[in-house]
Image (spheres, grey):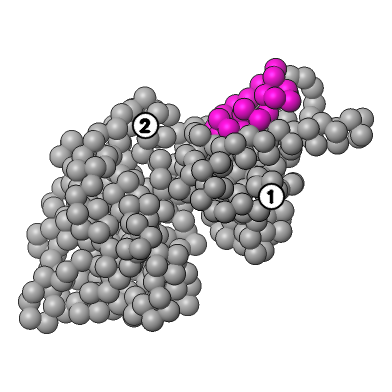
Amino acid sequence: MSRTPYRIAVAPSGFKESLTAREAAEAIAEGLRRVAPDADLDLIPLVDGGEGTAEALAAATGGRLVPRVAIGPLGSPVPTHFALLGDGTAVVEMAAVAGLALVPPDRRDPCATTTYGVGELIRAALDSGVKRILVGCGDSGTSDGGAGALQALGVRLLDADGVELPSGGGALRRLARIDPAGLDPRIRTTEILVACNPYNVLCGRQGVARVFGPQKGATPAQVEDLSAALEHWASHLAAALPASVDLRAAPGTGASGGLGAGLAAIGARLLPRFDVLLDHIDLDARLARADLVITAEGALDDQTVRGKIPAEVAHRARAAEVPVLALAGTLGHGVRAITAAGVDAYGSIVPAPVPLPEALDRAGEFLADAAERALRMVLVGTRLAA
């Protein structure tokens, strides 16, 4: 660090099922102030399109949340929302209506869950008169290829008898015909941007069913069924709604259980999420002003470098030659790969083995304590190097 007061950029993700990005940033700040009460802290809670995206972007732009009720991932109505930003853009956060957090652990079945509510929120945003909709993908509890969302927007999905398919990715194997005649005509005159992880693709060996299906409750047999169903879905989509990208393998088509592919088929543009989401917060300039950057996420592992927030922060901080410390609830397989992405040091916030429910409940406390320990070590290292 160059001088006192220290300038520290605090740029964490949220901790799933535990802390929002804002709460994580505040917990880190609490720990840092125990060591350096006069530090110049710049809190930059970051979202990746998943939980909290609509609220965070509304707050950053002087916008507002619009409450709604829509069909949740299990087919029942849930309270939800979309955002209207200060520039007139609407933000539909798929996790707010079809997220994994809305599916109790004992009911997780990605063959049955639906994105229907996402389509309802898009329609609600259209009703508000906007001409630009940003759909945030992340933290999904679905694997239906966006079929539910398209049904909510007026597309009919029919079996061999001409009967509308039920909800869920598992039913897509019975798809015989797609009838797009009823698609809401406003879709064609509205710019729809999908903020997604470009590493996620719909089909193939790295397709979304195989990579993320087990996390959503799929058994090995269901993974294979879903994979086949999504292959079938992609071929019918491409025939009925020709898209400008390869719906099977283009970057982002697998986002949120294939929602990316479904929306691309009706003209949405799939964009790397950070290219879209970080425009609102001037992240590069804020990192460049810091002496140290601290980022955090629930888990650091070999997936972190594949489009997760700590890797994105580290990449941008490295360009500004600012050191990066990453904190996490757990350190998983392949975690050392994050050093190549620009993370200079990393560690777990959990001081000793504890049951998972306790770790989730005490994450704020653990994160504050870990930030305090980390800054004390940074100061010791600075003095030894002086």
The region drawn magenta spans: 25-44
In the rendered structure, which amino acid carries the disc numbered 1? Ala
Where is residue 167 drawn, in percent x and y? 20, 66
Q: Give the alpha-carbon distance from disc 1 to disc 2, as whole Å.
A: 38 Å
| 368, above or below 35, in the image | below
> Of 20 and 184, which appears nearest the observer?
20
> Of 306 and 19, which appears nearest the observer?
19
What residue sits right under mark 1 in the picture? 352
What residue sits right under mark 2 in the picture? 58
User: Residue 245's mark?
Assistant: none
Query: Marks 1 and 2: CB-CB under 8 Å?
Result: no
Residue 40 is a magenta residue: yes
Q: Is residue 50 visible?
A: yes
Q: Quadrant of residue 294?
A: top right
Where is residue 337 drawn, in percent x and y? 69, 59
Say few, some or many: other residues with alpha carbon within 10 Å of mark 2 (under 14 / 14 to 19 / 20 or more).
Answer: many
Considering the image in quadrants, where does the N terminus appear?
top right
Residue placed furthest toward the left: 162
Looking at the image, which residue is at 13% across and 51% down?
185
Looking at the image, which residue is at 13% across and 73% down?
158
Left or right: 263, with 255 as reference point: left
| 22, above or below 360, in the image | above
> Of 360 and 374, which appears nearest the observer?
360
Where is residue 70 drawn, in percent x and y? 20, 47
* Total marks in image: 2
Considering the image in quadrants, where does the C terminus appear?
top right
